[in-house]
Image: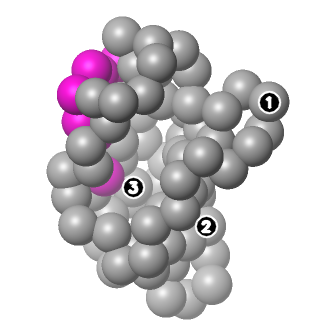
């Protein structure tokens, strides 16, 4: 899935996901379907391990140095 110049892959995925962006990501947050933040990572290193998450749909928010942000939906198989 792409949002402007940012891509999340693989989607759906199982044990990890990666994000590719032309801008450096300074914070990554993972949300469950209830909107609760279940993980917040400062200066994330990719790929992000997520084998511990239950199968389902998650929201991924990336925040960048220029104060912009991108939100993705990621499916854990």
Res 22 visible: yes
Q: Using the numbered discs, state the Cα–Cα distance from disc 2 to disc 3 in whole angstroms.
A: 10 Å
Q: In the picture, residue 6 is in which quadrant?
A: bottom left
The image's mark for residue 6 is 3
> In the rendered structure, which disc, 2 or 1, sits on the residue that comes first in sequence?
1
The scheme the figure's colours follow is one colour
Q: Using the numbered discs, state the Cα–Cα distance from disc 1 to disc 3 in whole angstroms.
A: 25 Å
Tag in front: 2 or 3: 2
Q: Is residue 65 left or right of residue 6?
A: right
- For the point 80% across and 30% down, the residue is 34
| Residue most extreme to the bottom | 66
The image's mark for residue 69 is 2
Q: Using the numbered discs, state the Cα–Cα distance from disc 2 to disc 1 in whole angstroms.
A: 20 Å
Tag in front: 2 or 1: 1
Residue 19 position in % (x across, y down):
31, 52
Q: Is residue 9 above or below residue 25?
A: above
Q: Is residue 6 left or right of residue 39?
A: left
- For the point 62% across and 76% down, the residue is 68
Q: In the picture, residue 52 is in which quadrant?
A: top left
Residue 71 position in % (x across, y down):
61, 49
Location of the N terminus by quadrant is: top left
Q: Is residue 14 above or below residue 41?
A: above
The image's mark for residue 34 is 1
What's drawn in magenta, residue-wise?
12-19
């Amino acid at each position: 899935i792409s949002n402007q110049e940012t891509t999340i892959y693989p989607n759906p995925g199982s044990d990890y996901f990666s994000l590719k962006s032309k801008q450096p990501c300074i914070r990554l947050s993972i949300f469950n379907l209830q909107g609760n933040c279940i993980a917040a990572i400062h200066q994330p290193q990719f790929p992000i391990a997520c084998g511990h998450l239950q199968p389902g749909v998650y929201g991924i928010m990336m925040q960048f140095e220029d104060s912009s942000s991108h939100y993705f939906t990621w499916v854990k198989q």
